[in-house]
Image (cartoon, rainbow, N blue to C red):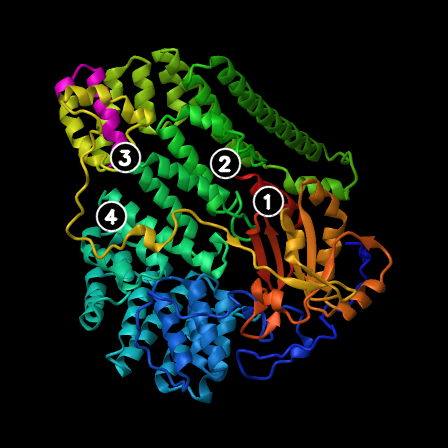
Amino acid sequence: MNLRYFAAIPLLCCLCITSQLWALEPSAGGDHDESSTTAGHSFHGEAFNEGPRQQAVLIPGIPKIDFPTSTKSERAQQFFEQGVAQLHGFWYLEAERSFRQAAKEDPEMAIAYWGMAMANVNNRERARGLIDEGVAKKDKGADQREKLYIDALNRYLPKFGEDAPKDDSDAKKKRAEKFIADLEKILHAYPDDIEAKAFLVLQIWLSDREGVKLTSRYAVNALLSEIFAVDPMHPAHHYRIHLWDSAQPKLALESAANCGPSMPGVAHMWHMPGHIYSKLHRYADAAWQQEASARVDHAHMTRARLMPDQIHNFAHNNEWLTRNLIHIGRVRDAIDQAQNLVSLPQHPKYNTLDKRGSYKYGRERLLQVLTQFALWDELIKESGGYYLPPTSDAAQQEEWLGWLAVAHFRTGDAARGAKTLRSLNRRRIALETKLLDLADAAAAAKEAETNKSEPQQSEEKSEADADESETQETPDQIKSHLKTLRTIIARAAAAAASHRREEAKFKEHAKHAKLEPLIEARWLADARDLKGALEIAKREYKKRTGEVRPLAILVDLLWRNEQKEEAIKQFQELRNVAADADIDTPLLSRLSHIAKAAGVQGDWRIPREPAADLGDRPPLDELGPFRWQTYEAPTWEAKLPDGSLTSAEEFSGRPRIVIFYLGFGCLHCMEQLHAMSPRVNEFRKAGIDIVAISTEDPETLKTGIDDFDKPIEIPLLADAQHHIFKSYRCWDDFENQPLHGTFLIDSRDRVRWQDIGYEPFMDVDFLLEESQRLLKLP
């Protein structure tokens, strides 16, 4: 394509004033000045910018909830009740989508905005904006029951702004107490409202965190029993699990069995029983639940074209699944799941190394399974590879280097281990030097103040000095960093001493290494203190019943300590505990001689019989894939500025960034293209093309291009009918307007990364780095 494009972008009005007139169909009534709304932003205010902006569908596996409303629209009622059910499953993104769809079907449905606010319990400021809309509409047809729900939430949510009262712990407690009283008020007026009972149970449990003491779990449980007497499969089973999770998990076993089947379309409902089974050391049952949850989420994300960490608790569920896979010895699946977490798309908003998202969890769990199962050769192979690459994060890099040194020592490569250990010590010395320099500077400053001498430099710092002071570590931060680093160094030194069979030196380093107890037991045994190692192993076995690793290590150490009869006895128990374990891993394969002594040939595992108290469990493969999978990019045809056609096939076969922008009249869009323009060659060097698709028609697009005089290389295409925008879901279905979008599509036409929203994605450095990372993954 030989097209002219330009990088010089004038400062236009921030409104999108293209010649296109979009048929606006807001999701709510009221007086909104649509002409003053920034392109891509909601016509109804800031609270509506975030959250789902694509239409909802009625999802299989959502139970029928009885929550009558005043709407005359059957579809609005269906979507509203679907949203209420999704609230019970903490599926907040989809709950809000359902409530928005209800408001789309019935713009005056005030209770739908109550639902949207309820779906934003983790974002109180947004929730406030949403409930305000419900309050404004409640007198236009809402019945008395709906008004009670709206008023209760309105009083509970804090006010925001300069004039808002201080929201301290006492204010939070009072609001929580009032909310509980308001929910009881609903029950006084409508005693058969089991939804009010369900939300009351939830709020009593949540308010314990806000200072309202939960004084009787049995009283709350009695309220739950009233719900189940009416509807035995109500999704409030979720709340009973939370109620007893930390107190008496056995009392929630019935709800653990019913939770997933009560709402099989919601991943979190499969996840929740894992809390109970984990507390009861039933790790295989917990792993099944969390795998079911992961598969349901994976299937949904592919259908809805969501990135994984957009789903509430997705990363938490999958990292917990990985931990339980480790407990039951499913080592290969644990590695696979950890690698999958690392390989998922990162986004600066919700998944980076410094957030509790998939990438950080995946890296931590991958190191955990490799180190705890002594897969040192695999750790060395992974380090610097696809899933454990070097990182600019000092803490993560040092943790990785520490384990790399351990792996070298444990595999007998003392020279490489020592080299890595020296690099860690150089880091330690640099930090110690920095700490001394800061101490000297502080002492000099104090002396200067005492002598009342003039400062050596101007009181006005340069901008560079100011920036440096803002990013410089404080002495306390350096001390904390040093403490962690010294622990890592001690761990590597302990591994070296163990390999050399130096018992005294090992014990000296182990005092500071904070070794995981079972790793310490194995290393101590290698350092020739079998008795001490056995004491640790016995202690851990008693604390960690149901786990494969403690029992396997105990069996091994008993045998090595010549307690062969006891070793065989414990091995018989291991055969049951390790029913799902990978027995070809080094930890378990070394027990083959014990199996032979016990008279067992070949696969020594005893198949697991399902527990009698489990609920309906569908085949896992029917729920979705084990790993998250990318989706296929929609095909399209667009017009060039001269009116001729081009298509997605012309860009196929090479990775590309596809930008959806709202026209030359949208300042934010022009800022994005302006930011991308100087970087085109960097993307090309990385093997990535860039193309941008506009809402404009060819004539308007050409006019915009001709108004500028600095050519750039990004092809600009026209999608005047918005077919491509809609096929990529860069479209607000509730307000019938386009949204900004940025996509990474690989050479196989699979979408690897995306950002869709009311503003364009502007972090070009992140986009380039993340695109390169994702495209390198196998």
Image x and y of residue 493, in percent: 44, 18
Is residue 550 shown in magenta?
Answer: yes
Earlier-in-chain disc, 2 versus 4: 4
Q: Amino acid at mark 4?
A: Tyr
Earlier-in-chain disc, 1 versus 4: 4
Which residue is tagged 3? 581
Earlier-in-chain disc, 1 versus 3: 3
| Residue at 16 percent of width and 32 percent of height | 573
Q: Are marks 2 and 3 in contact (CB under 8 Å)?
A: no
Earlier-in-chain disc, 2 versus 3: 2
Q: Secondary structure at mark 2?
A: loop
Which residue is tagged 4? 277
Name the disc covering residue 770, or none: 1
Which residue is tagged 2? 387
User: Quick one: 384 or 617, which is closer to the camera?
Assistant: 617
Q: For the residue carrying disc 4, how many other residues have a C-alpha within 10 Å: few (<14), some (14-19), or many (20+)?
A: many
Image x and y of residue 131, in percent: 47, 74
Q: For the residue carrying disc 1, how many other residues have a C-alpha within 10 Å: few (<14), some (14-19), or many (20+)?
A: some
Q: What is the spatial separation of the Cα atoms under label 1 and label 3, in whole angstroms?
A: 35 Å
Q: Which residues are magenta?
A: 547-565
